Each structure stands twice: as structure tokens, then as C-alpha cells.
Image: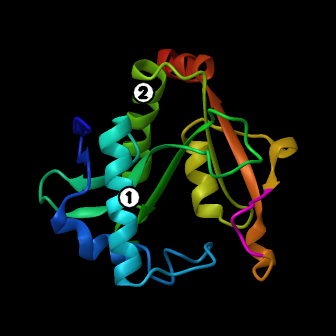
Amino acid sequence: MKPMRTERLILRNWEERDRELFHRINSDERVMEFFPFRRDRAAADAKMDEVRAWIDEDGYGFAAAEIAATGECIGFVGLSGTEDIDVLPAGTIEIGWRLAPEFWGKGYVTEASQAWLAYGFETLAVEEIVSFAVAGNHRSTAVMKRLGMTADPAADFDHPGIPDSHPKLKRHVLYRLSREDWQARKKAAG
């Protein structure tokens, strides 16, 4: 992927120097509060390689977010297909994120997400981008609302990848943003 620059961030593919951070955000209890698993180092390394290959193939994905001023990787923000979630229509594109806790509350996810929404709607020409989270994940749903996404309670779903052993994590809320609504918000802001 060609790196993208925002006011404070560089959004780029994963590099070897990011392995420790990738492992940390995939094993930290606070970051993974709404996930039924934690990745050990070997599993995190394998997942990072997988994500990096998807980005190389598609030109987008859950890309590393780096603070431009320091070069420090803080987590990921990006777009991804949802092929592994069979309850969503084929071709659905989601926006998602995961940051190390010390970078929460600084507006980084919103800033990076706005760049990814522009990429999705302008470059990829998708008609809609969705986001979803465990129903009780209020931090993530707050970001979705700041991005102008709208809840679609009729489309909420039990995530097929969550085992029955974690019933509190199964129900996911779905938020949507159409290209038309995104363009209207952009025009109103600009």
C-alpha cells in the first residue's frame, strides 16, 4: 500500500519493527476486552504476516498507524473485507481499529478513520462502509458516531466467530455510513 498521511499520523503497511507492538495489542487485557482470545507471540507474528500480505495484495487493510513526529507505531486502523462473517452481505467493507491503551482518547482513531473513509469512498468507490462491535463496547461505538455512522439495529448480529462459551461477546451492533451521507457531511464541514 502507498502510505497515507494525516495531520499527525502515517498509515502504512506493517514492518518488522512493529512486531512487539502488534503482539502487545493482541494480548493486552484492556485492548482485547471484547474479544474471546489473546494471541501469544507466535500467533501474533503469524497474524501480522497475514495482515501484511492482505495489504500488499489489496492495497488496503488493517494498516499500522504511526505517529509521524516520532515514528512510533500505536496500533492499527483500516478497511477490510468481511468475507469471514457470513451474516454480512458479500462485498461488505468494514472499518476497524485497535490501539495500545496509552494512545486512547487522543483522537487518533477518528483522525485515521477519516482518511480511510475518504480512501474507501473516493479511491475504492464503495457505496457503503460499516463498522461493528460487541454491544457493550461503548468506546468503539462512540468513534462510529463521531465518524457520522448510523446504528442499524435491524442488522445487529451474533458474530459467527465468537464461541458459545463467550455469550456476552456474541451480540454485535452494526453501524453504517453511505458514500452519499459521507459526501454530505464533508460538504457541510468544508
Residue 145 drawn at (x, y percent): 62, 44
Label 1: which residue? 50
Residue 119: assigned label:
none
Residue 59 drawn at (x, y percent): 33, 35
Q: Earlier in the sequence, mark 2 or mark 1?
A: 1
Q: Residue at x 74, y 58 (%)?
A: 172
Secondary element at tag 2:
helix
Label 2: which residue? 118
Mark 2 neighbour class, 10 Å CA radius: few under 14, some 14 to 19, many 20 or more: some
Q: Residue at x 69, y 43 (%)?
A: 175
The foreground one among 83 and 185 is 83
Q: Which quadrant of the rendered structure holds the N terminus?
A: top left
Residue 107 is covered by the magenta coloring: no
Residue 150 drawn at (x, y percent): 70, 37
Tell me the kind of residue under disc 2.
Answer: Ala
Total labels drawn = 2
Q: Residue at x 77, y 47 (%)?
A: 87
Residue 6 found in image quarter: top left
Residue 123 found in image quarter: top left
Magenta segment: 158-163
Mark 1 neighbour class, 10 Å CA radius: few under 14, some 14 to 19, many 20 or more: few
Q: Residue at x 51, y 84 (%)?
A: 29
Position above or below: 142 against 120: below
User: Is any part of residue 190 visible from this angle?
Assistant: no
Determine the main secondary structure of the stretch shown in magenta.
Answer: loop
Tell which tag, 2 or 1, sits nearer the viewer.
1
Tell me the kind of residue under disc 1.
Answer: Glu
> Do the residues under discs 2 and 1 have CB atoms within 8 angstroms?
no
